Protein backbone atom coordinates (compact mmCIF):
# COMPACT_ATOMS: atom_id res chain seq x y z
CA UNK A 1 0.00 0.00 0.00
CA UNK A 2 2.78 2.42 0.94
CA UNK A 3 4.62 1.62 -2.27
CA UNK A 4 1.62 2.49 -4.45
CA UNK A 5 1.08 5.76 -2.59
CA UNK A 6 4.76 6.66 -2.97
CA UNK A 7 4.66 5.78 -6.67
CA UNK A 8 1.55 7.84 -7.30
CA UNK A 9 3.03 10.81 -5.42
CA UNK A 10 6.21 10.51 -7.46
CA UNK A 11 4.23 10.46 -10.70
CA UNK A 12 2.22 13.48 -9.55
CA UNK A 13 5.36 15.43 -8.64
CA UNK A 14 7.02 14.60 -11.98
CA UNK A 15 3.87 15.74 -13.78
CA UNK A 16 3.82 19.01 -11.87
CA UNK A 17 7.51 19.61 -12.51
CA UNK A 18 7.14 18.87 -16.22
CA UNK A 19 4.22 21.26 -16.46
CA UNK A 20 6.44 24.03 -15.07
CA UNK A 21 9.21 23.52 -17.62
CA UNK A 22 9.38 26.55 -19.89
CA UNK A 23 8.36 25.58 -23.38
CA UNK A 24 8.77 27.59 -26.53
CA UNK A 25 5.17 27.31 -27.66
CA UNK A 26 3.18 29.63 -29.84
CA UNK A 27 -0.16 31.12 -28.86
CA UNK A 28 -2.66 28.28 -29.13
CA UNK A 29 -6.11 29.81 -29.39
CA UNK A 30 -7.35 32.15 -32.10
CA UNK A 31 -8.04 35.03 -29.73
CA UNK A 32 -4.59 34.84 -28.18
CA UNK A 33 -2.95 34.62 -31.60
CA UNK A 34 -4.84 37.66 -32.88
CA UNK A 35 -3.89 39.59 -29.73
CA UNK A 36 -0.20 38.79 -30.25
CA UNK A 37 -0.33 39.71 -33.93
CA UNK A 38 -2.08 43.01 -33.24
CA UNK A 39 0.44 43.92 -30.54
CA UNK A 40 3.30 43.32 -32.99
CA UNK A 41 1.90 45.87 -35.42
CA UNK A 42 1.25 48.56 -32.81
CA UNK A 43 4.07 50.85 -31.76
CA UNK A 44 3.15 50.71 -28.09
CA UNK A 45 2.35 46.98 -28.00
CA UNK A 46 2.43 45.35 -24.61
CA UNK A 47 4.78 42.57 -23.60
CA UNK A 48 3.28 39.17 -24.43
CA UNK A 49 5.93 36.88 -22.93
CA UNK A 50 3.59 35.76 -20.14
CA UNK A 51 0.81 34.82 -22.56
CA UNK A 52 2.19 31.40 -23.44
CA UNK A 53 3.01 30.62 -19.81
CA UNK A 54 -0.56 31.46 -18.89
CA UNK A 55 -1.91 29.15 -21.57
CA UNK A 56 0.27 26.26 -20.37
CA UNK A 57 -0.74 26.93 -16.76
CA UNK A 58 -4.45 26.92 -17.63
CA UNK A 59 -3.95 23.72 -19.61
CA UNK A 60 -2.37 21.81 -16.69
CA UNK A 61 -5.18 22.38 -14.19
CA UNK A 62 -7.75 20.12 -15.93
CA UNK A 63 -5.14 17.37 -16.35
CA UNK A 64 -4.27 17.49 -12.65
CA UNK A 65 -7.95 17.35 -11.74
CA UNK A 66 -8.59 14.41 -14.06
CA UNK A 67 -5.55 12.60 -12.67
CA UNK A 68 -6.72 13.12 -9.10
CA UNK A 69 -10.24 11.90 -9.86
CA UNK A 70 -8.83 8.91 -11.75
CA UNK A 71 -6.52 8.00 -8.88
CA UNK A 72 -9.31 8.29 -6.30
CA UNK A 73 -11.61 6.20 -8.48
CA UNK A 74 -8.90 3.53 -8.90
CA UNK A 75 -8.19 3.48 -5.16
CA UNK A 76 -11.91 3.20 -4.32
CA UNK A 77 -12.46 0.38 -6.81
CA UNK A 78 -9.42 -1.46 -5.43
CA UNK A 79 -10.86 -1.20 -1.90
CA UNK A 80 -14.22 -2.52 -3.12
CA UNK A 81 -12.53 -5.55 -4.72
CA UNK A 82 -10.67 -6.36 -1.52
CA UNK A 83 -13.84 -6.10 0.60
CA UNK A 84 -15.89 -8.26 -1.79
Image: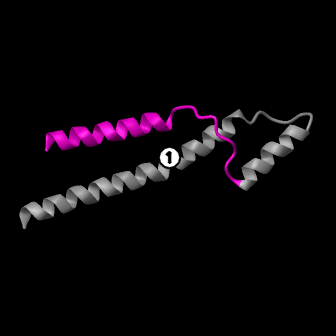
Residue 81 sits inside the magenta stretch: no
Coloration of the structure image: one colour
Residue 13 sits inside the magenta stretch: yes
Along the line of sight, which residue is nearer the eye, 21 or 76? 21
Residue found at x 68% / y 40%: 51
49 displayed left or right of 83? right
Kindly give the residue lying farthest to the bottom in the view shown. 84
Q: In the picture shown, does residue 53 fall above or below 73?
A: above
Q: Which residue is mark 1?
A: 60
**What SS does tag 1 mark?**
helix
Q: Which residues are magenta?
A: 1-29
Principal secondary structure, stretch drawn in magenta: helix
Coordinates of residue 1 in the picture (x, y in percent): 13, 45
Residue found at x 45% / y 51%: 63
Q: In the picture shown, does residue 63 fall above or below 45?
A: below
Quadrant of the image containing the C terminus: bottom left
Classify residue 83 by image quadrant: bottom left
Classify residue 42 by image quadrant: top right
Q: In the picture shown, does residue 56 fall above or below 22?
A: below
Residue found at x 17% / y 59%: 78
Residue found at x 73% / y 49%: 32
15 displayed left or right of 47? left
Coordinates of residue 40 in the picture (x, y in percent): 85, 38
Coordinates of residue 37 in the picture (x, y in percent): 83, 44
Kindly give the residue lying farthest to the right in the view shown. 43
Coordinates of residue 65 in the picture (x, y in percent): 41, 53
Amino acid sequence: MKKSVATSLLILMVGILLSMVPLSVQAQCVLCKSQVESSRTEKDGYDVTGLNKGIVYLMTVPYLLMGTVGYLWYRNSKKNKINS
